[in-house]
Image (spheres, rainbow, N blue to C red):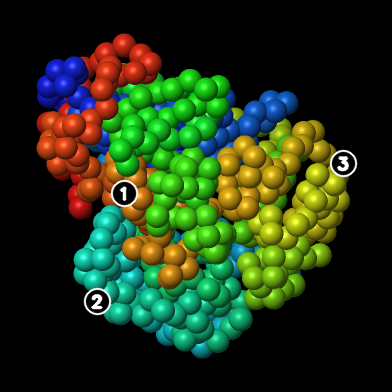
Amino acid sequence: MAPSVQSTFPVAGAPHALVIGSGFGGLAAAIRLRVKGYQVTVLEKLAQPGGRASVFRQDGFVFDAGPTIVTAPFLLEELWSLCGRRLQDDVRLVPMDPFYRIRFADGSHFDYSGDAQAMREEIRRFCPADLPGYERFMARANECYRLGFEELGSVAFDSLRDLLAAIPNMVRMRAWRSIHAMVCEHFRDERLRIVMSFHPLLIGGNPFSVTSVYSLIASLERRHGVHFAMGGTGALIRGMVKLLEGLQVAVRCGQPVKSILIEDGAARGVVLDDGSTVHADLVVSNADTAYTYRHMIAPEHRRFWTDRRIARGRYSMSLFVWYFGTDRRYEEVPHHMLILGPRYEALLRDIFRRHRLAHDFSLYLHRPTATDPSLAPPGCDTFYALSPVPHLDSATDWNTHQEPYRQAVQKALEASVLPGLGGHLRTSRMVTPLYFEHELRSIKGAAFGLEPLLTQSAWFRPHNRSEDVRDLYFVGAGTHPGAGIPGVLSSAKALDSVLPAAVDYGRTTAPADRRRRGSPAGPAGPAAPVVRPVARAAQSR
């Protein structure tokens, strides 16, 4: 039975928290803030909630614009439990088997799953001599999961002391190695090295550069599975919005934020693009962290995150995504599929280091109708084909290049897994790095913010509590621990650890004379009772 909720104190005494952005991180932060007793307003630039996880609907087809791979479902269950509800009452998660199919340029493929014996059989098909290495790799991945995810994933690296406390774990994980270098210690077969090292690409990292700590993803997936939300990832967003509605918190869409109001060095609300003002006692940004500092905060308020520091950061790749629907079904194509081109390391070097759009590419092909046919008209399939591409430092003119690039992707799909595709297309749309720059306001059009290098992770990543502005906080891909649904949900848990309950806010965050004056609710809507679950056993730390 779900835990009940009860009032904690009169709403008139509750400080007002303003959340910029309604992606997974922003919605999770809003839920946690409300449960802690804050009044909460969520502002979203787009016409619908979700941010990167918004939904496109076109010609009867439903496309998840962003993340499609759901891991660590316990982090979602925890949010529902905090609100006295159960996740399964609002969203149905379906386990994937296999998790992914990785198809190589020679036509061979590897089915990656959470079944240990099935994985051993797949490895034996490619290279029997690598079986002992697989066992050693998984042992190391399990250790990284324990040390990196369970112990550090939701810890806010708020001070140098936090960094020093984490160093022993980083040494045990040998975090200075890249994940590809770690994999090479255990596998000889080049194809298996790809299979065991590609995961950081799902969160914007180059396997040849990011820390081996990300081997924890292999353990995370084995332990908790890979899932799909029936109705698409957008069903999770709708479920989280429903939780907020139950807490009488509205998500105000079509409300782009122009700047953050700063008074006496503290965040005291925002100015919207239309010039109107929303006041608050604290601000949480789920927007791109670099964009927030660079474009929403005047330079005189930024002693640490200066324009120069922001410009010197190394940013993740961007994405070209082609969303399309067909008037036939391709039953032989699984839900998640990686279609690799002839190059791996050299292609990633072009994308991440040279910032050069190459003539070849690798693709992630998503076919959600393999699991949920309702996402397309009867007898049809919904797809998207995602190609990692350089961010806008490549100087590619995507306005003219997007259609030739789409045609190249279509040709590659027709030659591999979707024969006759051109004759069966019913709908089509594209997203390029310009979408990430203009619609999602990401610096350089980077799809995942700062690249998750060791020197841009944990304490070295923009902090969950701003280094420059009091009462300004961050959640989402650009802050600790990073991108991906587990990462951004964990960022909201990290925020939870540095923000007191609302009843303690005035005593522990700022002197009373710094508090914003005026109505605590601003224009957010009518006053609502503040709620808090009686049982919070799911909120593990």
User: Label 2: which residue?
Assistant: 168
Q: Which residue is drawn at 81% across and 44% down?
A: 399
Q: In the image, which disc is placed on residue 465?
A: 1
Separation of residues labelled 1 and 2 (CA atoms): 23 Å
The kind of residue tagged 1 is Arg
Secondary structure of the residue carrying numbered label 3? helix
Q: Which mark is residue 63?
A: none
**How far is the residue under mark 3 from the one under mark 1?**
53 Å
Residue 423 marker: 3
Quadrant position of residue 326: top right
Do we see residue 222 in this rendering? no
Amino acid tagged 3:
Gly
* Residue 465: % across, % down: 31, 49
Q: What element carries label 1?
A: loop
Amino acid tagged 2: Pro
Element at label 2 = helix
Closer to the chain start, of discs 1 and 2, is 2
Nearest to viewer (mark 1 / mark 2): 1
| Residue situated furthest top in the rendering | 526
Q: Is residue 379 above or below residue 74?
A: above
For residue 289, side relative to residue 511 (left or right): right
Q: Tell me the residue at 62%/37% (across/down).
A: 439
Query: Marks 3/2: CA distance?
Result: 58 Å
Is residue 149 left or right of 214 when viewed as pictured?
left
Residue 412 left/right relative to 6 = right
482 or 101: nearer the viewer: 482
